[in-house]
Amino acid sequence: MSGCLRLCTAASCRSRGALALLETSTLPVKEVGCLGPCSEGPLAVMDGTLLSLQQAASEPLEPSLAAALARSRAISSEDSFLKLQRRLVLARCGVVDPGCINDALAQGAYQQLQAVLAADNPSAVIETVRRSGLRGRGGAGYPTGLKWATVAAMPGEHKVVVCNADEGDPGAFMDRTLMEGDPHTLLEGMAIAAFAVGAQQGYIYVRAEYPLAIERLRTAIAAAEVRGWLGKGIRGSRFNVAIELRVGAGAYVCGEETALIHSIEGRRGVPRPRPPYPAEHGVFGLPTLINNVETFGNIPALLRLGVEAYGAGTKVFSLTGHVRRSGVLEVPMGTPLRTIVETMGGGAPPGRSIKAVQTGGPSGGCVPASALDTPVDYDSLKALGTIMGSGGMVVLDDTTNMVDLAAFFIAFSREESCGKCIPCRSGTVQLEMLLRKLLERRGSAADLSQLESLCHTVADASLCGLGQSAPKPVLSTLRHFRSDYLELLRPAEVGR
């Protein structure tokens, strides 16, 4: 084989031996980020062809990258997993070396920041974001342009931009993919946001469980400062912005923006009542803009394409669970769930059928197989009792007990509760106890009624989004899979 060889050395392919292959290579290799179909990894690209270097578990490890390439399997560009994507946020992921700013610049990094600085019109940037209809990709779906405009309108010379990279949902690794594979897209989006709202300081709050993302972000920040894309007088302009990393200890509650702010400030990461909202009183009391990784990652593509060509935008998902092909994919907003799960992911394993798709992590719910034609957008999923969330998508086949699944997520929320408010601190414990009672076939119809009532109490009375959304997996499974609960009632209770 000839030409440039790109080898994925992101976390997923590293777990499948990519680094061992790299160390044995006698060929010139370019390290890149995630190439998409992680279940086929390790992955490489040679002469434009995506190759799976995967081997059977029973086979001996290949002695070298050359040997692995010789037995590799090509994945066609016409494969539905690849063909049906629209890669805007992930356009350079798998193409550029994430540790080389020159490579990123050659592929268009920071061009939109340069154009924004040349135009010197912050309000025009905010108006473009507003007109695009871009909504926060972190879960809540708040209009991004409105949030930017609110922070920009706040008085004072000092403001802050924060990237919420505390990706903690089980089965979610979209933000990690961008940070590991193309950190300069995130930095450019943050710098543009800082210019638009008048901020001079930025923070990326990332969890310590992402060591590779942290390493590559630190390298990218240092390189951007040396090349004049971050720091003072950026590219000869009057614009100054510094971006720092803040590494969190892994508390799920720190994904909630007020808890995240406390953690950045060096305090215990617990939420506080709102108002005041971060736009008014955020990090160190300053007006603060908080968006997640993917939201900032959309900004360069949006400005490059313009509002009309950008259209409804895209959403990045991590597809996992009982599905033939898992990985990271980026699809047009509104793509039906069936297209993602069955056409792109290949559906359930042989001999099994899809029972549900869980979206939104512990804050989301389950979509039954009968509703797979639902388009993936904020309002359609909300109508089914779930959320799009940050983009975790877990496929569940017909072997799944939905009560057991609900108990798993409630146990997660119980463990991750900060304990500040009683409804979440005590309510999640009681919910888990009721679910375990049902799973042990000791539950009654009265227990089932109490479970549902308590879900609404916890959702209505909890202080922050963690507690308010914790009951959603229970409520959505009760709504769509009530028979799974009824089957667990004590024999004397069945039929009552």
Image (cartoon, rainbow, N blue to C red):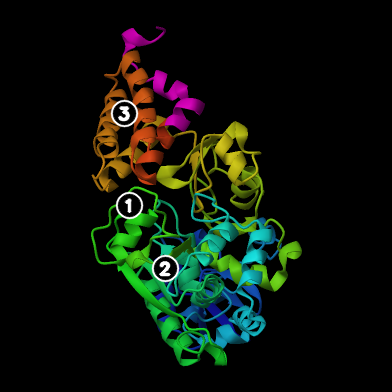
Q: What residue type is labelled 3?
A: Leu
Residue depicted at 42% across the width and 32% down the height: 402
Q: Is residue 490 magenta?
A: yes
x, y percent for residue 429:
25, 35
- Cβ–Cβ below 8 Å for labels 2 and 3? no
Circle 3 residue? 435
x, y percent for residue 217:
42, 77
In this rendering, the answer to whether 374 lies above or below 178 is above
* Residue toward you, 283 or 90: 283
* Residue toward you, 310 or 345: 310
x, y percent for residue 443:
29, 18
Q: What stretch is highlighted in magenta?
A: 475-496
Left or right of residue 432: residue 452:
right
Which residue of the protein is positioned furthest toward the front in this rendering? 155
Could you classify mark 2 by the number of other residues whose Cα lies within 10 Å: few (under 14), some (14-19), or many (20 or more)? Answer: many
Q: Which of pointers 2 and 3 lies earlier in the amino acid sequence?
A: 2
Figure quadrant of residue 336: top right
- The mark closer to the camera, 2 or 1, is 1
x, y percent for residue 89:
59, 67
Q: What residue type is labelled 1?
A: Val
Circle 1 residue? 253
Q: Which of pointers 1 and 3 lies earlier in the amino acid sequence?
A: 1
- The image's mark for residue 11 is 2
- Cβ–Cβ below 8 Å for labels 1 and 3? no
Q: Distance between the residues labelled 1 and 3?
A: 23 Å
Left or right of residue 426: residue 214:
right
Q: How far apart are marks 2 and 3 (CA)?
A: 35 Å
